[in-house]
Image: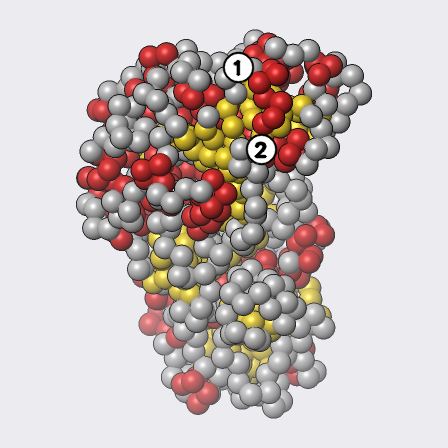
């Protein structure tokens, strides 16, 4: 892979994020107005200052009008994009590259999703007209394949595996309980997680991320301009994105204990950022914990744990808020909620707070480098995004 | 002389106890929620077509049913596509009476005498009004026959036949009626018994066969009372009667005469003479003589093996839900999308025939067929690779309790084929609690769901039966 990266050439100078949750009284347009105006304020700018927008949403609107109409954006470029559950991160990546190119000076990346208007459980999406031969399996079912495969490969008995998954859910709810913008702001007892109604395979409802509504936005400029807008900007060290060839769904040698797409996007990001030892160098991470076993596998794919060791690191508290390498300090998809198009930006929002020392009760001591990881699709067939940001 | 070249049968996996319906002895076969008469006809036809003798190339396909999935749209086309028969076949749908299964068999043999090679697949999902005799006494099954003439050695030659047609109100169902109705059986018997005695006698005479020469007699009809006064006048002994499978399958509509004949052929020896009579809206009688070719001409599954492979505790409410008789609370998920005509057309070989591709460059197999090989990325350089009869096993699986299904949980499995290739597909005909990694599977043609009046057919995997 030959991405050269834009390490330290682009900065984030303002962010906004709505509370995530069941916003029965707010439309996608309302959520966009809330997040974007908060971001304007955060960067101390007027709408006129922004040269272009990237809007990520998987299904809450089509075209740039989804953003320009509610905000009354005055005849400027607004790109609407979609990359499954990594949509929000794609908005950041494309916006960052636009300012790095010099085409624009100040841009915004915005994400939104309004999931709770459908009346259905879980995620829904409209596929293009098809031949009717798809498996019809849901997201939790696809990701549930990870847990028994991991347990078998590394000799973890299923009871211990259950404890590991529960620990991940417990940790993320513990963190979310300390976050006023999270969907679920309560700690959840271990027994409740263990006994939650089964959704797919080993996974109960408490192994699944929250289905929610929300929006988040970032103001982005070149590094040399950053201090014009904000005294405490954060800087992009790496942005990597990979779409896999969907081998795992078709080749018998794929064993459902890894995401090759994540491994590759992490490798690429670490080269861009000059990171040699992510376990030691990454202070904290927001990762795509759509389901509890996803987070477990990601710890190894991102290089935070050696192969076969993430379950031990998890149980040892390495990824706890007060551990050596906190993961999902804001509560993650699990507790903060997962309005798809907004989630990548929400992850960045936590980096923004933590690096600037604004995370309150969740504040991690002197973080240097933060990582966000965003995934879309299913094991064997996915897209993966990794960013590294710092001061 | 023309006759049956190959045959096959199919009895679905599920049984419902008559005691669970409200009385009666034994059990009846019940098509699963993902089966219909067309998908069952495909399963029986695959049995009949698996090892055709040299020179037998099917050029005519007839689908026979009183419960055809489409009233307009050729169900025989689904059968042709799913069995990978050539598009040059003559294809027709038949039905209208449960006698049409045997009538079509006779017509097929006539076509064989004219030089054709004919697949006749009779299949029915018999739904009766709740608590009525048709619900209890009916069954779901399919039977298929390949009929040939000169140049192919039949396993059973047709040596005698006779027919009779009677305009009489016995069983009827007109559009809009949810269930068929039947006139008082005593009346039917008074009409049909003499007709059967006469027609049966003419068929034996046509074949130059005495009643006592028959190794087996298959009696099938809408009304069992018809047969009471038939045996003695016809010179038959009860020991000659083939088991009608009333206690294990139930009467499977248009498929039943064929299914019972298939069962008789399963146990027949060369030289045996078998008479088959079906009484509905008249009478058809066929007399066959089994040949030496029977030894190599039997299908992989006997009727008895299908009957023995079962789950027999289907709940009555579940059965009614499957048959769309009982309304129920749908899952809180979007309805499945209606499959679209152009994508189905483009994917026909995959969707219906279950044909993948094999890369000419590296030999890897791709399911579904890919233009660019997933292993070596060679482009547009592959050969069609059939998969319907390929054995496979579970690499890993999950129970999906959220996905839309008439029978949750959906069992999603990563299925690896012994000859290479992997796909994610649904399992069927299996107890979710008994699925295990490594389980051996085989593929089966199913109706995944119906949306917008379009039946979405595709393949699932099931434990080997």
Relative to the observer, which residue lies in front, A356 or A132? Answer: A356
Residue A183 on image: x %, y % = 43, 17
Give the label on residue A312, or none. Answer: none
Asked whether the residues under marks 2 and 1 belong to the same chain, the reply is yes
Q: Residue at x 80, y 20 (%)?
A: A75
Disc 2 target residue = A9
Relative placement, left or right, of A253 versus A8 is left
Q: Residue at x 69, y 57 (%)?
A: B345
Q: How many marks?
A: 2
Relative to the observer, which residue lies in front, B100 or A152? Answer: A152
Quick check: A331 above or below B455?
Answer: above
Quick check: B353 above or below A223?
Answer: below
Task: Specify whether residue B452 is in view.
Answer: yes
Mark 1 Cα-neighbour bin, 10 Å: few <14, some 14–19, many ≥20: few
Relative placement, left or right, of B399 versus A19 is left
Residue A61 on image: x %, y % = 67, 26
The local secondary structure at tag 2 comes to loop
Disc 1 target residue = A231
Relative to the observer, which residue lies in front, A188 or A310? Answer: A310
> Which quarter of the picture shows residue B437?
bottom left
Quick check: A27 above or below B236?
Answer: above
Residue A323 on image: x %, y % = 26, 27
What subunit carries mark 1?
A
């Amino acid at each position: 892979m030959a991405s050269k990266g834009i390490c330290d050439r682009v900065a984030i100078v303002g962010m906004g994020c709505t509370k995530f949750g069941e916003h029965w009284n707010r439309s996608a347009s309302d959520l966009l107005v809330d997040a974007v105006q908060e971001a304007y304020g955060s960067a101390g700018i007027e709408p006129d200052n922004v040269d272009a927008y990237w809007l990520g949403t998987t299904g809450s609107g089509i075209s740039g009008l989804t953003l320009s109409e509610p905000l009354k954006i005055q005849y400027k470029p607004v790109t609407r994009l979609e990359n499954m559950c990594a949509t929000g991160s794609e908005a950041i990546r494309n916006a960052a590259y636009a300012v790095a190119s010099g085409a624009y000076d100040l841009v915004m990346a915005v994400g939104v999703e309004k999931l709770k208007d459908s009346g259905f459980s879980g995620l829904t999406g409209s596929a293009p007209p098809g031949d009717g031969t798809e498996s019809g399996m849901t997201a939790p079912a696809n990701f549930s394949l990870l847990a028994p495969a991991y347990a078998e490969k590394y000799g973890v008995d299923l009871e211990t595996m259950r404890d590991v998954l529960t620990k991940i859910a417990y940790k993320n709810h513990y963190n979310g309980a300390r976050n006023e913008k999270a969907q679920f702001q309560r700690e959840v007892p271990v027994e409740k997680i263990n006994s939650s109604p089964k959704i797919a395979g080993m996974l109960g409802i408490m192994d699944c991320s929250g289905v929610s509504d929300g929006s988040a936005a970032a103001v982005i400029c070149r590094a040399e301009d950053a201090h014009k807008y904000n005294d405490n900007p954060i800087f992009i060290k790496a942005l990597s994105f990979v779409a896999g060839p969907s081998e795992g769904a078709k080749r018998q040698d794929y064993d459902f204990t890894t995401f090759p797409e994540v491994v590759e996007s992490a490798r690429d990001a670490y080269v861009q950022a000059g990171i040699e030892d992510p376990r030691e160098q990454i202070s904290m991470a927001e990762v795509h914990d759509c389901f509890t076993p996803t987070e477990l596998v990601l710890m190894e794919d991102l290089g935070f744990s050696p192969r076969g060791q993430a379950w031990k690191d998890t149980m040892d508290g390495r990824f706890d808020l007060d551990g050596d390498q906190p993961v999902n300090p804001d509560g993650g998809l699990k507790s903060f909620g997962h309005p798809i198009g907004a989630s990548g930006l929400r992850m960045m929002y936590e980096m923004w707070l933590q690096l600037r020392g604004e995370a309150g009760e969740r504040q991690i001591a002197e973080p240097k480098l933060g990582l966000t990881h965003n995934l879309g699709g299913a094991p064997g067939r996915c897209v993966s995004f990794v960013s590294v940001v710092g001061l | 002389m023309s006759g049956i070249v190959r045959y096959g049968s199919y009895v679905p996996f599920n049984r419902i106890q008559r005691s669970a319906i409200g009385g009666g002895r034994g059990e009846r076969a019940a098509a699963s929620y993902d089966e219909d008469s067309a998908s069952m006809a495909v399963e029986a036809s695959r049995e009949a077509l698996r090892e055709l003798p040299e020179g037998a190339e099917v050029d005519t396909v007839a689908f026979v049913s009183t419960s055809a999935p489409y009233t307009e749209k050729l169900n025989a086309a689904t059968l042709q596509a799913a069995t990978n028969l050539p598009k040059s076949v003559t294809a027709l749908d038949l039905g209208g009476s449960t006698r049409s299964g045997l009538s079509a068999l006779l017509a097929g043999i006539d076509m064989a005498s004219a030089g054709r090679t004919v697949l006749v697949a009779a299949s029915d999902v018999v739904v009766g009004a709740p608590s009525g005799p048709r619900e209890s006494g009916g069954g779901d099954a399919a039977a298929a026959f390949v009929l040939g003439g000169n140049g192919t050695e039949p396993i059973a030659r047709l040596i005698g036949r006779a027919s009779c047609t009677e305009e009489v109100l016995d069983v009827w169902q007109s559009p809009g009626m949810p269930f068929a109705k039947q006139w008082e059986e005593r009346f039917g018997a008074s009409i049909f018994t003499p007709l059967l005695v006469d027609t049966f006698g003419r068929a034996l005479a046509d074949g130059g066969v005495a009643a006592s020469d028959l190794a087996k007699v298959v009696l099938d009809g809408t009304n069992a009372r018809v047969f009471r006064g038939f045996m003695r006048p016809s010179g038959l002994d009860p020991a000659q009667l083939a088991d009608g499978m009333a206690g294990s399958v139930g009467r499977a509509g248009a498929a039943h005469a064929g299914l019972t004949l298939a069962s008789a052929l399963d146990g027949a020896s060369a030289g045996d003479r078998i008479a088959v009579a079906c009484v509905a809206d008249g009478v058809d009688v066929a007399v066959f003589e089994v040949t030496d070719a029977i030894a190599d001409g039997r299908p992989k599954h006997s009727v008895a093996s299908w009957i023995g492979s079962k789950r027999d505790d289907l709940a009555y409410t579940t059965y009614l839900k499957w048959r769309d008789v009982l309304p129920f609370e749908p899952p809180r998920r979007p309805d499945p999308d209606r499959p679209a005509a152009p994508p189905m057309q483009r994917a026909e070989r995959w969707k219906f025939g279950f044909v993948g591709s094999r890369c000419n460059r590296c030999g890897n197999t791709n399911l579904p067929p890919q233009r660019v090989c997933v292993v070596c990325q060679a482009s547009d350089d592959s050969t069609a690779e059939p998969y319907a009869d390929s054995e496979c096993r579970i690499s890993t699986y999950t129970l999906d309790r959220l996905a839309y299904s008439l029978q949750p949980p959906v069992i999603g499995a990563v299925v690896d084929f012994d000859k290479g290739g992997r796909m994610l597909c649904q399992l069927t005909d299996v107890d979710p609690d008994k699925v295990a990694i490594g389980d051996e599977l085989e593929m089966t043609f199913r109706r995944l769901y119906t949306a917008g009046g379009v039946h979405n057919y595709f393949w699932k995997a099931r434990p080997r039966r």
